[in-house]
Image: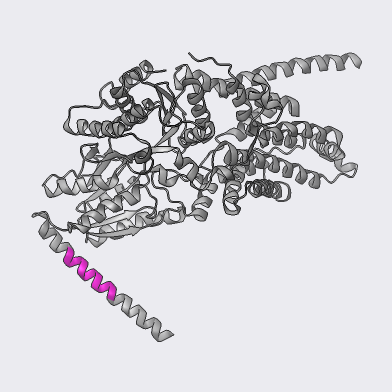
Amino acid sequence: MNKLFKALISLALVAGLTACGSGDSGSSSGNGAAASGNVRNVAYLVNGNLGDKSFFDSAKSGLDELEAAGRITLNTIEMGGTDSDKPKWLSTLYEVSDSGEYDLIICGTYQMPDNLKEVAEAYPDQKYLIFDDDTYAGEDANVVNIVYKQNDLGYIVGTFAGSMTLDTSLDGINADKVIGFVGGYDSPVINDFMIGYITGAQSVDPDIKVDVRYTSDYVDTAKAKEYGASMINDSKCDIIWGVAGNAGNGAAEAILEAGNGWFIGVDSDQELTFSSDLAAITLTSGLKNVGNSLVWVFDEWDAGNEYFGQKVSLGIAEGGVGIVTDKNYDKYASDDTKALVEAAINNVNSGDVVVPSAFDANGNENAQTVRDSVRP
Amino acid sequence: MVTIFTTDFFFSIFRIATPILFATLAAVIGEKGGVSNIGLEGIMMISALFGSLTAYWTQSWFIGLLIALIVGCGVALLMGFFAFNLKTDIILTGTAVNMIGSGGTLFLVKVITQATEGKSLASTTSLITKSLQIPSWNIPLISSIPVLGKVISGHSILTYLAFLLVWLTWVLLYRTPLGLNIRSVGENPNAASSVGVSVLKIRYITIAITGVLAGFGGAYMSMYYAMGWSLDMVAGRGFIALAAQAMGAGEPLGSMFAALIFGFAQALGIKISAMGVDSNLVAPIPYIVTIISLVIFAVVQRNNEKKRHSAEALQK
């Protein structure tokens, strides 16, 4: 037993040494090859676990794609997401940075910026990427912050919802040209989604009205459900987009209870994360394509464009945002709707359509004016 | 154009008032027994979590509801142990329970379900289907009455239970020996003790009842109102209940009307938002109603007291 144990330990040590060795050689070759745009060593730190069917999985799929193409070597470290795992996040960041093996260290979500800032300042020569967070954007020259253009996302979702509400042949779609939007707060972040949504819907039919409500809350699901019920009963909304964190799901529950109408999710594919009842009434979800955005960063990097020390907002053109097009979308959307959505994506891509943003100068005020003008 | 006073408006008043009413009844009984349970919010959160999780594990809403009540009772008894036996301040104990109700449930749900955070906050919504929710009841004859039927019929069975419990609470407090003991311990523990009432036992019974009632409120939140538990989902209803108890002068019937006023205020806010009023003006409506109601209540009470004092002075 003891001998076996020792043997295992020595085996582990040897394996560790060889791993270090290969890592070092990989790093040097990586640095050497960087100029010619070749293999980079990447560490992806997951502050949770893979299998979330959301951001972590999306980022992994993008990185897997890069690895399969031979453009990076990937070391994915799952740090765990429970409270007891949180101290590990910082120490793992330090460890990975200290090893000096990696050309780029990737992490994400709003939970990481404080940890990352500390470590990034301790290792100024190490490069870092953080997705879906801009807390300390631009403060460290070795960190790139990737964020997603909500207004572009809103535009696609709005085009889709606007087209769907005209398709009265579908169950649950009524004759009124009214769609709904449940937001968290009357704030620029939420209004950026909203103005895109309204612009998209009105591009389909200028008569479409949009009922916008704010829960003033991201946690009170029950309150959002009351708002959802009021939107269905008072304004005859048949499609509601929920952009209010957990509370937004209350709108989906209101639709389920009313028995008519459809829900649209946000950020990740909510058809995958909902239970079967709620998934059945979810037409699609507005997506932040973390994976695509990472591929875009490497494309740019290889082309000689580095964004370290900056915040990069990615929209439709960069593949940073999109819409779920399989499952219920495929099943319920008519060919006309699908064509419209595709055209909307192409128009934004080509620059024919510029979606207004709540972050433009006076953008939030304009968004509020537009919102009040399209009220049912 | 939106008309405010529709049937679904009145329907929603009852739906909104129900969880507040459960917690208000808990506060009423607690105050009568001299046990200031300000931990109702936390107990509701914890019950909401275990109710929905148990419903998922056992695939039975009924067992989920039972566990929610048992857990609510258990947490309340634990509070009692700290407050009565270990002599901690019951307000601080209640505060601790409220903090556990927020951070502790989040911790538990991550340990139990391995849910990771990603961008979205933790919830058990993904586990809960409609069949695991507490059913609603279409009352056979009443549901066919034109307007009234749409308002009264079709609520969760817990809503009907909540209003039944208003009456039962009154019966308990004023028509049973236990109620007499609860009130006497609340009024003057020394006097109660001198006639042989076990003050400790009565206090434990009182706080256990508050726990069960808060457990009903928690179960309503996660097993009917919303599908599953999510972080901070009770959102202050346990605190509003304390205000409702004060507004209702600590009596079951008065407190029921207070809870209904809150339901009315929130339902009104939602209808007003449908007319396009700024959300920043709509959001505080329930709280403004609270403050106004408390002021009215205080003035009325002061006048009543003045009258009583002068009546007493005349008798002397």
Of residues A184 and B246, which is closer to you in this image?
Answer: A184
Most distant residue in the front direction = A169
Rendering coords of residue A195 (x, y %): 32, 25
Magenta segment range? A15-26
Q: Quadrant of the C terminus of chain B?
A: top right
Q: Quadrant of residue A315?
A: top left
Of residues A207 and B78, which is closer to you in this image?
Answer: A207
Does residue A309 show up? yes
Rendering coords of residue A66 (x, y %): 21, 54
Task: Please name the predominant secondary structure of the magenta segment in the image.
Answer: helix
Inspect the magenta stretch and tell me whether residue A25 lies in it: yes
Q: Quadrant of residue A35?
A: bottom left
Rendering coords of residue A217 (x, y %): 47, 32
Of residues B228 and A135, which is closer to you in this image?
Answer: B228
Q: Residue at x 19, y 56 (%)?
A: A103
B50 in relation to A138, above or below: below
Most distant residue in the left direction = A36
Does residue B265 show up? no
Inspect the magenta stretch and tell me whether residue A86 lies in it: no
Residue A7 lies left or right of residue B132; in this view the side is left
Q: Residue at x 58, y 54 (%)?
A: B57
